[in-house]
Amino acid sequence: MRVKTFIVLTVFVVMSAVCGYAQEAILAIDGEPCADAGATGIEVSITLDNSAIEDDVAGFQFDLNFDKSALTKTDVAKTPRSEDLAIFSTSDTDDGIRVVATGIGQTISDVTGAIAIVTFDVDAGASGDYDLTFVNPKVANPAAQALPLSVVDGVFSVPCGGGGGDEAILAVEDACGDPGQTGVEVNITLDNSALTEDVAGFQFDLYFDKTVLAVSDIVKTDRTEDLTIFSFSETDDGLRLVATGIGTIVSGTTGAIAKAIFDVDAGAAVGEYDLTFVNAKVADPGANPLPVVVVDGTFFVPCDAVELVREDIVPTNFHLTQNYPNPFNPTTSFDLSVPTSEMVNAVIYNVMGQKVRTLVSEELPAGYYTLTWDGLSELGIPVTSGVYFCQVKAGTFGSSIKMLLLK
């Protein structure tokens, strides 16, 4: 028996009772900082999560390296968490900046959140993704003893969204099906919220393995129901969709613009099959092309984010194992024992406590299960290298594991 569900992820809430296994603090860049070329006064938060260690934190230091030809540090400021520290000094280095902070009888307040704000100006000629890398980081307790620490580096993107915030994003959501399954709907989405122009038409080829997947139809959605032309045809490598309005536009700015209906070949092998955009275009009412980027997807055969592997022997208690392999790239698995039928929630979080994806949220019968995460976010986008957590809750049971993705 198998329990099938789409692979998805969610937010990690740090609790000492649940996460006592993670005996280290986590120094990280908050979010995904970005700005246009020439922008000034861009604030980047440096965070410290010390909820998993018993000692108070009375000091920290680190070098933050970055491309100084693209980014210029203009200020490093305290936050409410670090405002009581007596010493808070910053200096420039050849490769970035150095921050040293310590208290004389004072400690950092709270256990999560920003400990420093770095303000950057962006060079007018900058373009691309620039690494924000911690070097030689340390945290210490009031006795000046070093505490265990891990880091999560960041990336500063110029411009935001890879296109100055002026690009539409065409994406195909991840999907899955069992061999022989028919009528599997796959959403094709368009996010044109960053454009100032309306979208009146689009076209693209979508490539996939035609020995495994056969497209039976492509249908409109609420966003495209007013378009007068909406036609698709098969190609040697997949399908082609052309849609446009005569005096009409795509409604809204986010969400699905088409649903592709797939049948899965009965002999399809277990695996991951690419869904790839080729020659994608969007246009305004004047038929002028608009900037667009694409996010390809993956079709999984079968749909086994959660697989019941043993039902002949009923576990005596709940248990969540460490993931394997660990570190991983891009897929990892972990085992879950469920002693009684129970509503189970398994969610992936990043180090900021932000939900990344939900693996399962349903009632599972008693048995032994294997859960799998493919390193993709809720939107089907590969996540960056770093530390992630999977939190499982079932009734009164709660447990979490820490995972490391390395690319």
Image (cartoon, rainbow, N blue to C red):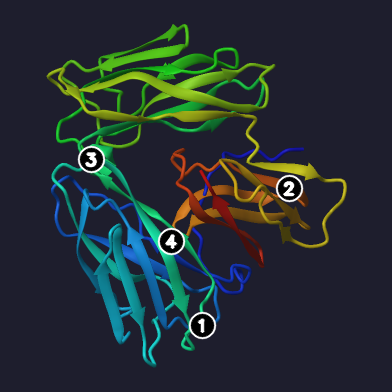
Judging by the rendered image, the residue that carries numbered circle 1 is 145
Kind of residue at badge 1: Gln
Contact between labelled residues 4 and 3, with CB atoms less than 8 Å apart: no
Q: Residue at x 45, y 72 (%)?
A: 138
Q: Nearer the viewer, residue 340 or 61?
A: 61
Q: Earlier in the sequence, mark 3 or mark 2?
A: 3
Instruction: Estimate the spatial distance between the alpha carbons at disc 3 and disc 1, rounded to whole Å.
Output: 41 Å
Q: Position of residue 194 (x, y in %)?
A: 22, 39
On the image, the x and y values in percent for residue 61 come to 38, 73
- In the picture as drawn, the residue positioned furthest to the bottom comes out as 105
Distance CA(mark 4)–CA(mark 1): 25 Å
Q: Position of 226 compared to 147: left or right?
A: left
Q: Which mark is residue 352?
A: 4
Disc 1 is placed on an element classified as: loop
Determine which residue is flagged by label 3. 127
Toward the viewer: 51 or 173?
51
Question: In the rendered image, which residue does mark 2 sit on?
Answer: 369
Q: Earlier in the sequence, mark 3 or mark 1?
A: 3
SS at circle 2:
strand
- Label 2 to label 1: alpha-carbon separation: 42 Å
Residue 308, quarter of the rendered image = top right
Ranked by sequence position, the earlier of labels 4 and 2 is: 4
